[in-house]
Image (cartoon, rainbow, N blue to C red):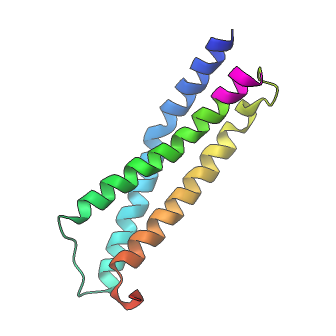
Amino acid sequence: MKSERIIDGIKWWESKRWIFNLLVGLSGVFGIVKGINVATENIFVISDILGIILSGIIANIFYSSGILVEIFDNYYFNNKLKMERFRIVFLILGCLVCCVYTYVSAYFYYNLSFQW
């Protein structure tokens, strides 16, 4: 029974991962486009792809924390906290935070007027 709840939680989170990646990716693209449009002297170079890949990996690691919270609740607390009630809240809040962070960091990276 415990393993079924864990598997159901993993299936739920993994079925939503593509939505998370799409929204975070689009916010990064909008930030890059807006930052480049404001700062006409700065352009996108190939080495920036490494930063984009690293950012995507880190965002997905943080996304996996939702899965881990449910697994810890089911395995260690015998579902006493009933964290599955908060799945959609964690998904929306996590997605909003990652999208805002991705947009702002991409925008300011390419915006030369914000150089220190």
The residue drawn where x is 50% and y is 59% is 99
Quadrant, the C terminus: bottom left
Q: Residue 65 sits in which quadrant?
A: top right
The correct choice, above or below, for 44 with respect to 81 in the image is: below
The span shown in magenta is: 71-77
- Residue 56 x/y as whole percent: 38, 51
> Which residue is nearer to you in this view: 21 or 72?
72
Residue 51 place in picture, x, y as percent? 31, 61
Q: How many marks?
A: 0
Q: Residue at x 37, y 76 (%)?
A: 109
Q: Position of residue 80 (x, y in %)?
A: 82, 25
**Which residue is most to the right?**
80
Q: Residue furthest front?
A: 76
Q: Residue at the location (51% across, 65% down)?
A: 101
Q: Is residue 70 left or right of residue 103?
A: right
- Is residue 78 rendered magenta in the image? no
Q: Mostly what secondary structure, the magenta segment?
A: helix
Q: Residue 95, percent across and down?
A: 55, 52
Q: Quadrant of the N terminus?
A: top right
The residue that appears at 25% across and 87% down in the rendered structure is 40
- Please indicate whether residue 116 sits to the left or right of residue 33 in the image: right
Q: Is residue 17 above or below residue 22?
A: above
Relative to residue 25, is residue 48 depicted above or below? below
Q: Is residue 72 left or right of residue 52?
A: right
